[in-house]
Image: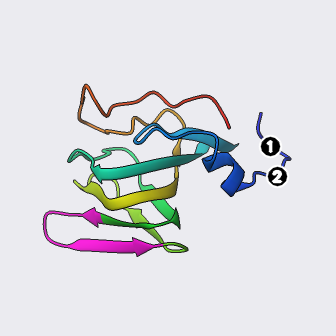
Amino acid sequence: MMKNRVVNLREAFATFDEHWRPRIAGEMNDYVVKIVKFQGEFVWHKHEDTDEMFLVHKGEMVIRFRERDVRLRAGELFIIPRGVEHVTIADQECEALIIEPGGTRNTGDVEDKEKTAFVEPSV
């Protein structure tokens, strides 16, 4: 499923408008490549059992930790270590890829009525 094919990221991001609702763009081993659009502030959370990688495709984002902020621009990536509390923020709409194990809940250890999402079908 979703292997051995080209994914055009510009076209994939154009298929949806919703913020904070990731889509699966590809799978490898036990990992998924998710694409997501977001704007505003997410929820503070952590992933106890896995690292999480963000790669900005378009726009800018901030990953806020309790002790510092990390700003990412298009073409930059950052890996959040497992168990580290963080929140993602984008003043303007940001498009990003997230690489993490399949089945990872986007809000980690937090249940949020508005932002916890089940991953949408592939693009």
The type of colouring in the image is rainbow
| Magenta-span inclusion, residue 108 | no
100 horizontally vs 29: left or right: left
Q: Is residue 5 above or below residue 91?
A: above
| Residue 10 found in image quarter | bottom right
| Label 1: few (<14), some (14–19) or many (≥20) C-alpha neighbours in 10 Å | few
Q: How many marks?
A: 2
| Magenta-span inclusion, residue 65 | yes
| Residue 86 found in image quarter | bottom left
Majority SS type along the magenta span: strand
Q: In this view of the protein, can residue 123 be seen by the observer?
A: yes
Q: Residue furthest right?
A: 4
Residue linked to disc 1: 3
The residue sitting at 55% across, 29% down in the picture is 120
8 horizontally vs 52: left or right: right
The residue sitting at 50% across, 56% down in the picture is 95
The amino acid type, in three-letter code, at marker 1 is Lys
Q: Position of residue 35 (x, y in %)?
A: 55, 48
Residue range in magenta is 63-73
Q: Position of residue 9 (x, y in %)?
A: 68, 55
Q: Position of residue 43 (x, y in %)?
A: 23, 44
The amino acid type, in three-letter code, at marker 2 is Val
| Residue 65 found in image quarter | bottom left
How many angstroms separate mark 1 from mark 2 (CA)? 9 Å
Residue linked to disc 2: 6
Helix or strand or loop: what does disc 2 sit on? loop
Q: Position of residue 69 (x, y in %)?
A: 23, 72
Tag 1 near tag 2, CB within 8 Å: no
